[in-house]
Image (cartoon, grey):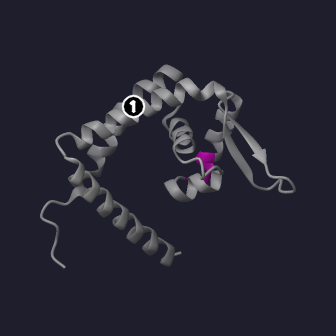
Amino acid sequence: MSMIPVNPWEHQNAIKTLYAKCVENVCSRHQITRMELDILLFLANNPCYDTATDIVEIRYLSKSQVSASIKLLEERGYLRKEYAAGNRKTAHLKICEDASDLIADGRRAQEKFVAINLQGLDQKEIEGMKRCFDRILKNINAYLKEDE
């Protein structure tokens, strides 16, 4: 396999920096950390994944950081834990009403990030890129699971 002429992975720090710039005002305005914002937005954008384990496994974040951030979000009234009947082991994370303005601001920041990235691309190009990234993510996840 030949090398990719322009390696997009070499630019991942630029992408991360742009995202950080897009969300920094949200974190500042609501006095939360980036990790706390990321957790709230993950839960809001992916309602079928609602446990700390889901966040750790899907976002590849450290368990200790996720746990600490969830605790702070609970203390601020942004999250609460619910347990299924007969199962006190698995806490399902539910977003509280107090987080609605914060999530709305976070989603606007995410929309700005996406708009900047996709500027000048037509729908066909965007769909092709999405298919490629979906395949790349499947490849990465399969490799990482093999390596466990």
67 to the left or right of 102: right
- In the depicted structure, whether residue 146 falls above or below residue 21: below
* Residue at the front extreme, as displayed: 124
Residue 73 location, quadrant: top right
Percent across and percent down for residue 17 are 32, 39
From the viewer's perspective, is 20 left or right of 72? left
Residue 100 visible in the shown view: yes
Looking at the picture, how far across and down is residue 23, in whole percent?
40, 31
At mark 1, the secondary structure is helix
**In this rendering, is residue 120 above or below 105?**
below
- Badge 1, how many Cα within 10 Å: few under 14, some, many 20+? many
Q: Which residues are magenta?
A: 62-66
- Of residues 104 and 20, the one drawn nearer to the viewer in this rendering: 104
- Based on the picture, tell me whether residue 71 belongs to the magenta stretch: no
Quarter of the image for residue 43 reads: top right
Q: Is residue 9 visible?
A: no
Q: Name the main secondary structure of what is drawn in magenta.
A: helix
Q: Residue 108: image x %, image y %?
A: 41, 30
Quarter of the image that includes the N terminus: bottom left
Residue under numbered circle 1: 109
